[in-house]
Amino acid sequence: MKEGSVEILTTQIQLARKGIASSEAEQVAKDEDFPLDKLLKLIASGRVVITRNVKRENVRPLGIGEGLRTKINANIGSSADFCDVDYELKKAKIAVEYGADTIMDLSTGGDIDAIRRKVIKNIDVPLGTVPIYQAAIEASKKKGAIVDMDEDDMFKAIEKHAEDGVDFMTVHVGVTKKAVELLVKHKRIIPMVSRGGTFHAAWIIHNGQENPLYSNFDYLLELARKYDFTLSLGDGLRPGCIHDASDELQMQELLTISELVERAWEGGVQVMVEGPGHLPIHQVGANVRIQKALCKGAPFYVLGPLVTDLAPGYDHITGAIGGAIAAMEGADFLCYVTPAEHLGLPNEDDVKLGVIASKIAAHAGDIAKLGEKASYRDDEMARARIAIDWEKQYELSLDPRRAQLYHERLKAKEPKTCTMCGQFCAMKIISEALGNPNIEKMKC
């Protein structure tokens, strides 16, 4: 790579294939406490990606994929109804504060460029975007309708985002003319819920032509190589309700994406695959295993999955249930779901709750996948509990302030205990009975 330049001689995957450890790979190996030689093999095979655009300067490289801890993403972004650049930045900072590994800017209103650039400048985690949003919205304003955009509009948006330093981009390359023809005949309850996917589907139906991102996939790879941004192959036909889960449309798109994953690898481009969506709980594991088999271990990025359609206002919970199972089964990257999902634009508290719920899901999955490498912190929490060390318990919590608030909102009569058990605290009683030297003996 050339410092301070967009010119790139080799991408992360190409370097790894030569056995060369980039500074980014070294950083990821250190952060994950992972053998560097093994990490290079996983990057070379495409089973791990490092999300960093060569234009980014203030970002810590992030590894996503096999053998690494499950990462989580938090979405922010304006809408046509509400746009405030500073507010979106504030939400991004809250997400990072509570543990989001990446941010995606999904802005569709106001000055989209300004929001993206301000977030890139002020956060130090990888940023993802969906460039088709901006291409479609600008075409609608300038030409009259979303379907009036052309392929130049699409690719110019992608290159603009890459030039700004976006580290990974969702591209709905699986929404092909063949898939849309199948969609027209299919009897889903909800035909499509992916915004980017519907932009492409409407364009294909109106123009009678193939999706330009699919028909010009080699040019897309050329752009990805130039900036070494990661392609996130979007699930435009993901199920939007439990009824439609794991159907022919979803699987047809995944088959197309699996072919494009191999083309990306052949072209020296990092790639991950996006997944559903809404799935009944008993189908989550199977969906992860199918993706991993068809896409030969490419990192899997899932939205939720949401395991019921009946919890508006609580979908951070439905998403966390599905996310924990997905992570356990091998999903590598969870997109958070907030309580506002399906209802409106999330606020700051929604962002926080969505991140925490997703962190719980990711960590629960990692205990199953990574064993003691993940569960050592749970062991520390157990030791803090038997020692009745409240400060340590707060410190180890995913949300220390909330834990402290619950403990202190009512004052316990018995020293060191909480108001749930008081003098009948199980930790206190068993420690006194066993004569644990780490516990200060307390009189009942």
Image (tube, rainbow, N blue to C red):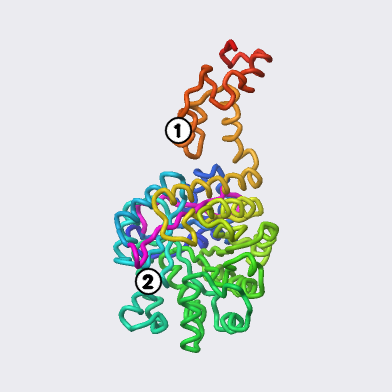
Q: Is residue 436 a member of the stretch shown in magenta? A: no
Task: In this rendered view, identify the residue nearer to me: 271 or 209.
Answer: 209
Q: Looking at the rendering, in which quadrant would you find the C terminus?
A: top right
In the picture, the disc for residue 134 is 2
How far apart in space, not on screen, are marks 1 and 2 (Cα)? 42 Å
Is residue 222 shown left or right of residue 235?
left
Q: Secondary structure at mark 2?
A: helix
What amino acid type is highlighted by mark number 2? Gln
What amino acid type is highlighted by mark number 1? Leu
Crowding at dot 1, Cα within 10 Å, few <14 / some 14-19 / many 20+, comes out as few
In percent of width and height, residue 11 lies at 47, 62
In percent of width and height, residue 335 lies at 51, 56
Label 1 sits on residue: 405
What is the chief secondary structure element of the magenta stretch?
loop
Res. 302 image quadrant: bottom right
Q: Please tell me which of labels 1 and 2 falls first in the chain.
A: 2
Crowding at dot 2, Cα within 10 Å, few <14 / some 14-19 / many 20+, comes out as many
Q: Start and end of the magenta stretch?
A: 56-82
Vertical comparison of 249 with 283: above or below: below
Vertical comparison of 415 with 178: above or below: above
Is residue 219 among what the camera can see?
yes
Is residue 5 among what the camera can see?
no
User: Which residue is pictured at 51% across the width and 70% down the height?
Assistant: 194
